[in-house]
Amino acid sequence: MNGTLTPLRAWLLMLPLLVIMLSVIGWPFVDTLRLSFTDARLVGTGGEYVGLENYRRLFASDAFWRAFRITTVFAVVSVLLEMVLGVLVALLLFQDFRGRNILRALLILPWALPTVVNALLWRLIYNPEYGALNALLLQSGLMEEYRSWLGDPGSALAALIVADAWKNFPLVALISLAALHAVPQAIRAAAIVDGANAFARFRYVILPYLAGPLMVAMVLRTIEAFKVFDIIWVMTRGGPANSTRTLSILVYQEAFSFQRAGSGASLALIITLAVTLLAVAYVAMIRRAAGGKF
Amino acid sequence: MEQRSLGFSVFLYASALLLAVLILAPFAWLFIMSISSTTDLISKPLRWWPAQADWSRYRVLTDLTPNTHGAALMSALKNSVLVAAIATLAALAVSVPTGWALSRSRAVNWSLGLVIGTYMLPPVALAVPLYMGLAALDLLNTRFGLAVVYLTILAPFTAWLLKSGFDPIPRDIELAAAIDGARLDQTLRILILPLAAPVIGTAALFAYLLAWDEFFYALLFTSDQRAKTVTVAIADLAGGRVADYGLIATAGVIAALPPVLFGLLMQRTLISGLTTGSVKG
């Protein structure tokens, strides 16, 4: 028939996207791979083939391992915080009380706030001289003197994590809330009739429904957090004393500030590898959660 | 619903209040900073409420006189609007047919993983060649160049979103149309597009917000008012030598206003879009 979707026609429909993906994703990616084996500069000389030299130097450098550690801490802690806070908020908003719908609507606000504005907002809140956090803690007697939250290597990463978690916990809360609504009313009622206490009901009735969506949210958030750049760039630029320099910030410095395109490319590929492993774990988890139907 | 004890009710409302404060306080503070006088903002102990509301910074930042903060922010807003619009339209143009093909044809369905995979690629893995490529084509610091780069993020994302949006539309009507002699493009145009309009609208909204939020590529590929987007302008202000924190806060309010208003107005659409994918697994 004239109007059926033959495989050839399906491929033709996909052609525009495939062309775009090949030219603005495929080609740059392959070129990054090529560059990672050269000593190319960002501007000017084409660069000589140096084999695995970039990778060898990378794995031998303290800066890389430190950035790797910082990135992992940032990703794990901020995602855990978002998960815990998100689930608690979802359980709260699942209850029936007045004003619940307004609160649900408010959840969209931090999510909709642009990341860069979120960073600016928290930078102002953390300001060592005039920031609201210092004023609040001092005026309520919780602190003796002003602190430089972002200027102290001991607290800068934690301060960034709080700012990131504040913006992203609503997403987890919304996803959890939708999952809670998917729990059949009859099962919840039965558990209450059978005398299960609140904890048992959460553990054995609610959690099984929550686990799948939460896992998806967790891995997606972890991948995002592992790539983190903008919030850190605006709040600390990787400082003080490189205490918040994550892998993406390190790539930026290497490839664009120092214009070492070759070694920047090799570092970028290491991040890609880590993110890919996370993504593979993600797909495997969804498959398992869907009982192998996916 | 079980009978609630008084203690539990108190706990419930206290938690709800705490949550409301947690969400709203940072927003409120950003706004208060934007209308507080500089004296109020640097006073110790800090004044939490301005002695007198000062709206002058909004006038300063919307003033179009060349080489002022206002001109910089307004041109950045215009660039953001245009770049996000071009990129969103282009992404939809390529991802509507793709999403449909992915949804309907077994022959291409396997490539969905590839599409999702590219969406998860870290931008740093493409940045250096894209920079060199844009430089070679003389597209650095242009809105068009940036919009093309944004396609790398938006197109796979909208294709993925649209595929799951096309899935629930019954195939029978397409089959019936084919039997009645409709060509494929007619089926897509006359039959499917109207049915999928809400999904396409959702995809456009998400794509636009995603482009509006983008910072990394914009920072790398733009350098002045001709193409700098609002995220870069905000980062410049936050990291620059501006002494008036109120002015920085005001710029934040202005840059946040469009997406936050969008978010509030379209929250039903956004929430269902954000949650269905992961809940269905």
Image (cartoon, coloured by chain):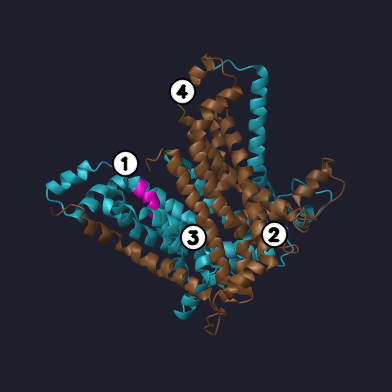
For residue A244, the mark is 2
- 3 vs 1, front mark: 3
**B172 on left or right of A242:** left
- Establish whether labels 4 and 1 are both on one chain: no
SS label for mark 1: loop
> Which color was chain A given?
brown
In three-dimensional space, the C-alpha distance between marks 4 and 1, rounded to whole angstroms, equals 25 Å
- Establish whether labels 4 and 2 are both on one chain: yes
Mark 4 falls within which chain? A
**B195 on left or right of A151:** left
- Establish whether labels 3 and 1 are both on one chain: yes
> Which color was chain B given?
cyan
- 3 vs 4, front mark: 3
**B128 on left or right of A242:** left
Would you call the spot at circle 3 few (<14 residues within 10 Å), some (14-19), or many (20 or more)?
A: many
Mark 2 falls within which chain? A
In three-dimensional space, the C-alpha distance between marks 2 and 1, rounded to whole angstroms, equals 45 Å
- Does residue A49 sit above or below B101 in this rendering? below
Range of residues picked out in magenta: B159-164
Evaluate if marks 3 and 1 touch, with contact meaning CB atoms under 8 Å apart: no
Mark 1 falls within which chain? B
- Establish whether labels 2 and 3 are both on one chain: no
Which residue bears the numbered disc 1? B168
